[in-house]
Image: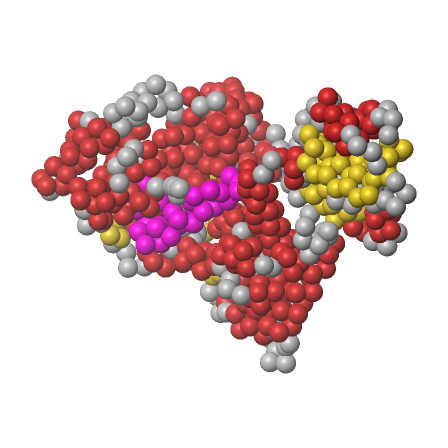
């Protein structure tokens, strides 16, 4: 504890240090009975998170929130308690980092997406939320070895796909590089270890080459009067690994394994140093990048060039000022007025435009899968830098098309687009833009607007969202009709009655899920491509099945199982391809285990089970083949089923008693009886009995026929 206090003690007010001490004791006490997977006290984790935040140079509120970031999620401490003890600002930061609780999610992806949505909303209000989360993830990755293998890989994959790219997007290279390398260790242990071994094997030669280059550089820069700090290092592991796999190259074929960084005082010195190194070594064509003139969206600035060393081994040189270096390592954190808790640069909001756009786009996203896909494509993908005809730089996702460019400029430009020129040449709208392209969009007031095919051409969610908005606004009636037709056809194909699925008790939850208000909104969204037909229909079917299942269980708990004669599908009958389908037994033939059976899909009442020799079933077989479905008896079933036995006997005293005695002596329950006398001195008796299977019915019939007054007996079938 004293180590952290000592590290951040300078420059803070006495009351801030007292609040930090209080937070330490509070967090330590809240987590006192908890252990980490390593066996260490749980408090070691928030302490290390606060330590990482202190290294980033963040303000006291952020460091304290780092100490407290797990108390709401993992202890019985409430948000109100935090507000009372540490104030609303710190409580808000802790709440922003806390995962969603008390919600049920269908899938891990849905849970992940909703937690990220919550975090990004909090991050848009206060960027410090994500800095705490990144520090939390970094320490968890440093101690990931204590988890079992499956969990390690799951966490490492999420880190590689979400948190490392997020650190990159915010320009925090110091955290990004370590997250990448730690993730690789668990995502591909073999590849990681092979790379470590290769680097170790070539270490001596690499260091020798590096020293020779650095000595020459220092001498030449000094002679040119350029003050500079020079350091050399291998590029981080994941960067090398990714290039090897994406470019299908061996380690020896990667050009820039070695990187030399030159840090100077001014921008002028950056270009001076660049000219110097280009006179000392031959530059590799096409490998020069000027991120000073055209900064990356995450604020990164530097000059990059790849050179051929005297030994023929390529190496990369990065040249930047001290301020650029600070920004490259710490990104947004470097732009913080640490003691005042706000960004020092008035231009910081502009750096986070992508975040505000993402939060706007997510309102048009129909499910968790689409949201996660947008994060990975629009936010975390590699970038291309293209130019407008006036020379303005536009930063787009790698793989973007002229249409993405047009919609990035303005919705009206995209909607009226009829063609594009790239570097003076006409190109198709599906052309993939390259860094350095000069893009000119050709528009026409006579354009009828976007084509639905454009949704397949554009790469970015921003463009897709704007295209959908156009269809949503311009063709609502057409979209409603189209959407209704699409949903009806798909429901019919899947043999569901759409009228039943669209009952308010089913649609209410679906509307809430997709953030729509009416059936027309839903039809329109399907029509213009906001949701797919299957997304909506699967949700409706899911709500229908859940409701029917609950009602069935309720009925079964209120009635005798055999009396209803409707066993649960999971116990009595298997329906091919539909394990949760509601099952009911046709009263016309009362099938029991052992009978040959078939299923008929009814409108809104699940599958009706008939005996194959049932006359009612035979009458519909040829008429509605599309609603027939394969069914079979489930093995190991012990449930009682209803069967009806009809008996024709002489109308004599004692015959009824003799028949019921047969049932009783064979432990067969009698649920209903119906009898009528005939004009010829006979009586017809119908017994409804509970039996286990068809063979038991046959045994009972044989014993009933043994009664001397009985003329004939059979099982009733329609």
Rendered-image quadrant of the C terminus:
top right
146 falls in the magenta region? no
Q: Residue at x 69, y 65 (%)?
A: 485
Decide which of 710, 189 is in the foreground and name it. 710
| Residue at the farthest front position | 653
Residue 419 is situated, as x and y percent measured from the top left of the image, at 64, 70
Decide which of 579, 194 is in the foreground and name it. 579
Decide which of 625, 706 is in the foreground and name it. 706
In the rendered image, the vertical position of residue 127 relative to residue 386, given as above or below:
above
Give the overall secondary structure of the magenta segment.
Answer: helix
In the rendered image, the vertical position of residue 628 relative to residue 536, given as above or below:
above
Q: Residue at x 73, y 56 (%)?
A: 492
Residue 311 is situated, as x and y percent measured from the top left of the image, at 53, 29
109 falls in the magenta region? yes
Number of marks present in the image shown: 0
**Drawn side of residue 352 relative to residue 533, left or right:** left
Q: Which residues are magenta?
A: 103-132
| Residue at the farthest bottom position | 446
Residue 9 is situated, as x and y percent measured from the top left of the image, at 15, 35
Q: Residue at x 72, y 45 (%)?
A: 607
In the rendered image, the vertical position of residue 637 relative to residue 544, given as above or below:
above
Rendered-image quadrant of the N terminus:
top left
Decide which of 491, 636 is in the foreground and name it. 636
């Amino acid at each position: 504890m004293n180590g952290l206090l000592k590290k951040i003690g300078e420059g803070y007010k006495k009351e801030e240090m007292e609040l930090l001490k209080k937070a330490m004791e509070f967090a330590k006490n809240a987590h006192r009975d908890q252990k980490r997977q390593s066996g260490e006290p749980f408090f070691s984790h928030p302490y290390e998170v606060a330590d990482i935040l202190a290294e980033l140079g963040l303000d006291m509120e952020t460091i304290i929130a780092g100490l407290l970031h797990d108390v709401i999620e993992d202890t019985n401490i409430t948000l109100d308690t935090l507000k009372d003890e540490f104030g609303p600002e710190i409580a808000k930061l802790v709440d922003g980092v806390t995962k969603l609780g008390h919600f049920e999610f269908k899938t891990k992806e849905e849970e992940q997406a909703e937690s990220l949505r919550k975090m990004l909303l909090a991050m848009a209000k206060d960027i410090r939320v994500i800095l705490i989360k990144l520090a939390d993830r970094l320490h968890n990755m440093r101690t990931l070895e204590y988890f079992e293998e499956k969990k390690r890989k799951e966490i490492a994959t999420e880190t590689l796909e979400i948190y490392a790219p997020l650190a990159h997007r915010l320009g925090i290279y110091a955290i990004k590089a370590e997250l990448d390398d730690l993730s690789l260790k668990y995502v591909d242990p073999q590849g990681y270890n092979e790379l470590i071994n290769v680097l170790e094997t070539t270490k001596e030669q690499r260091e020798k080459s590096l020293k020779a280059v650095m000595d020459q550089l220092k001498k030449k820069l000094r002679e040119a009067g350029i003050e500079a700090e020079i350091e050399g290092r291998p590029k981080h592991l994941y960067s090398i690994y990714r290039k090897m796999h994406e470019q299908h190259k061996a380690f020896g074929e990667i050009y820039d394994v070695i990187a030399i960084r030159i840090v100077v005082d001014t921008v002028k010195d950056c270009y001076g140093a660049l000219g110097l190194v280009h006179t000392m070594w031959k530059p590799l064509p096409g490998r020069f990048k000027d991120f000073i003139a055209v900064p990356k969206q995450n604020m990164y600035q530097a000059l990059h060039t790849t050179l051929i060393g005297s030994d023929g081994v390529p190496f990369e040189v990065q040249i930047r000022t001290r301020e650029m270096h600070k920004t490259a390592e710490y990104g947004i954190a470097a732009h913080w007025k640490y003691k005042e808790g706000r960004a020092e640069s008035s231009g910081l909001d502009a750096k986070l435009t992508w975040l505000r756009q993402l939060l706007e786009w997510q309102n048009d996203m129909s499910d968790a899968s689409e949201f996660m896909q947008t994060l990975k494509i629009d936010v975390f993908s590699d970038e291309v830098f293209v130019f407008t005809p006036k020379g303005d730089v536009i930063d787009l996702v790698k793989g973007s098309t002229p249409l993405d460019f047009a919609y990035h400029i303005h919705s009206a430009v995209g909607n009226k687009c009829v063609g594009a020129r790239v570097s003076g040449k006409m190109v198709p709208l599906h052309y993939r833009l390259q860094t350095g392209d000069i893009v000119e969009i050709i528009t026409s007031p006579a354009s009828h607007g976007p084509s639905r095919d454009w949704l397949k051409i554009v790469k970015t969610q921003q463009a897709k969202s704007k295209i959908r908005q156009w269809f949503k606004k311009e063709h609502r009636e057409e979209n409603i009709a189209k959407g209704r037709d699409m949903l009806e056809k798909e429901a019919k194909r899947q043999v569901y009655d759409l009228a039943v699925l669209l009952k308010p008790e089913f649609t209410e939850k679906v509307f809430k899920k997709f953030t729509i208000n009416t059936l027309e909104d839903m039809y329109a969204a399907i029509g213009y491509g906001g949701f797919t037909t299957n997304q909506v229909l699967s949700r409706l079917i899911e709500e229908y099945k859940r409701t029917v299942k609950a009602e069935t269980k309720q009925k079964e708990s209120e009635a005798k199982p055999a009396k209803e004669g409707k066993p649960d599908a999971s116990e009595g009958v298997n329906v091919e391809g539909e394990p949760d389908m509601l099952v009911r037994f046709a009263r016309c033939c009362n099938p029991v285990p052992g009978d040959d059976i078939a299923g008929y899909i009814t409108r809104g009442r699940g599958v009706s089970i008939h005996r194959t020799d049932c006359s009612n079933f035979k009458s519909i077989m040829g008429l509605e083949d599309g609603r027939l479905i394969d069914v079979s008896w489930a093995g190991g079933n012990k449930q009682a089923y209803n069967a009806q036995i009809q008996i024709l006997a002489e109308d004599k005293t004692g015959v009824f008693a003799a028949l019921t005695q047969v049932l009783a002596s064979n432990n067969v329950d009698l649920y209903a009886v119906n009898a009528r006398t005939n004009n010829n001195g006979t009586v017809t008796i119908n017994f409804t009995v509970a039996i286990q299977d068809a063979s038991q019915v046959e045994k009972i019939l044989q014993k009933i026929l043994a009664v001397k007054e009985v003329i004939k007996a059979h099982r009733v079938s329609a």
